Image (cartoon, rainbow, N blue to C red):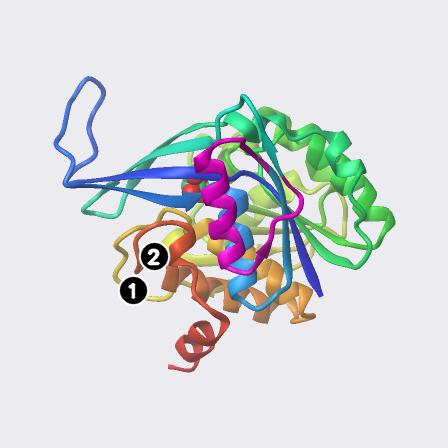
Amino acid sequence: MTVFVLGSINLDAVARVDDLPRPGETVAGLSLELFLGGKGANQAVAAARMGAPTRLMGAVGGDESGRNLKAKLAGYGVQVADVMELDGVATGQAHVWVAKSAENMIVVTAGANARVTPQQVSATPLEGQRVLLCQLETPPTAIEALFRTGASKGALRVLNAAPALPQGAALFPLTDILILNQTELATYAKLDREPVRLEEVSIAARKLMSRPDQIIIVTLGSAGVAAVRRDEAFLIEGKKVKAIDTVGAGDCFCGALAAALAGNIDLRDAVEMANAAAALSVQKAGAAPSMPSRREVEVFLES
Ligand code: RIB
C-alpha cells in the first residue's frame, strides 16, 4: 500500500558549531556539509526506507541542485515523477546550524517549494494511495486540494502541521491524523508554555480536535510520543540514545508512521515503530541520510 507525500525538497547546508550563536554574535563553524533535506523529502525517504512504495509531489528549481536532489530521492527508492523542475526558480534551501549539544536552528528559503499549486494536485490521479502525508512547507492551498480529493478516494490524511503557521489550523478539519511537536501544540492551542505530562498534552490536543474520530499525535522529544483520541490517550516512552543531530527526527517519525499505517499496522504498534525509527535517526548526521531501514528498526525494537 502506497504513501503519497506532498511536500518540500531542500538542499540543507549544515554547519556544525560548538554552541549556537546568540543574536549579533559570530561563531566559528567546525564543518559544513550539504544534504538532501526538506520536510517532504525527509518524510518520503523515511517512508520508503521503511518499505512502503512512496511517491513524492513537489517542486525543485530547473538547476543542478534540483536535479541532484531528485536523483538522490530516486536513489532512496522514492518515486519522483510528480516532482516538477521549474526553470528560473531556485531550489529550496535550508541553512542549518547544529550545536555539540545536538540542538539546532534552521532558516528555510522556500524557492520552488512555494510554487506547488492545487492545479498540480488536481492533475494527478490518486487511485490506490493509502496514506496522504503533508507538512506546511508547501502552500496550504495545494494541501487542501489533496486532502479534499483524498477523502473521496478513502485515503488516510496525515498532516504534520510544521512549521506552525496561522493558516495551518484551517486544514485540521480535513485531517484524520494530526502530528505536532510540543512547541507546535502550544502555538496552535495558544498556551503560554509547552505541555509536558500526558494529561496536559491530552487537554491541549483535544482543544484542537475538530472531529470526534480525529487522532492527534504529539512528539515529546526524548520523553517519547503521546497519541490522543477524544476518549483515550497513550504514551510511548522515548528510547535512551545519544543524539548527535536531531534535524529531521520529527520527519523520520512522520514518514515511518505513514509507512506502518499504510501497511495496516495498528496505531499503537505504528507509533512504537516510528518512535524507534526517530531514535535511530538522531544518532546519524543529516536529515534524509539518517533515516533507518525497516530491518534496522525491527532489530532495535527487539534489542
Ligand atoms: O525538518 C527538518 C527539515 O526542515 C530540514 O531538512 C530542512 O530542510 C527544513 O525543511
Q: Position of residue 263 (x, y in %)?
A: 67, 69
Q: Which residue is mark 1?
A: 241
Q: Would residue 146 appear left or right of 70 to someone viewing this image?
A: right
Mark 2 is surrounded, within 10 Å at the Cα level, by few (under 14), some (14 to 19) or many (20 or more) other residues, namely: many
**Looking at the rendering, in which quadrant would you find the C terminus?**
bottom left
Circles 2 and 1: CB atoms closer than 8 Å:
yes
Q: Position of residue 132 (x, y in %)?
A: 69, 50
Is 45 situated above or below 138? Answer: below
The amino acid marked with disc number 1 is: Val
**Looking at the rendering, in which quadrant would you find the N terminus?**
bottom right
Is 222 situated above or below 7? Answer: below
Q: Position of residue 258 (x, y in %)?
A: 61, 58
Range of residues picked out in magenta: 59-83
- Residue located farthest toward the bottom when viewing the structure as drawn: 302
Q: Position of residue 267 (x, y in %)?
A: 63, 66
Mark 1 is surrounded, within 10 Å at the Cα level, by few (under 14), some (14 to 19) or many (20 or more) other residues, namely: few
Label number found at residue 136:
none
Q: Is residue 91 magenta?
A: no
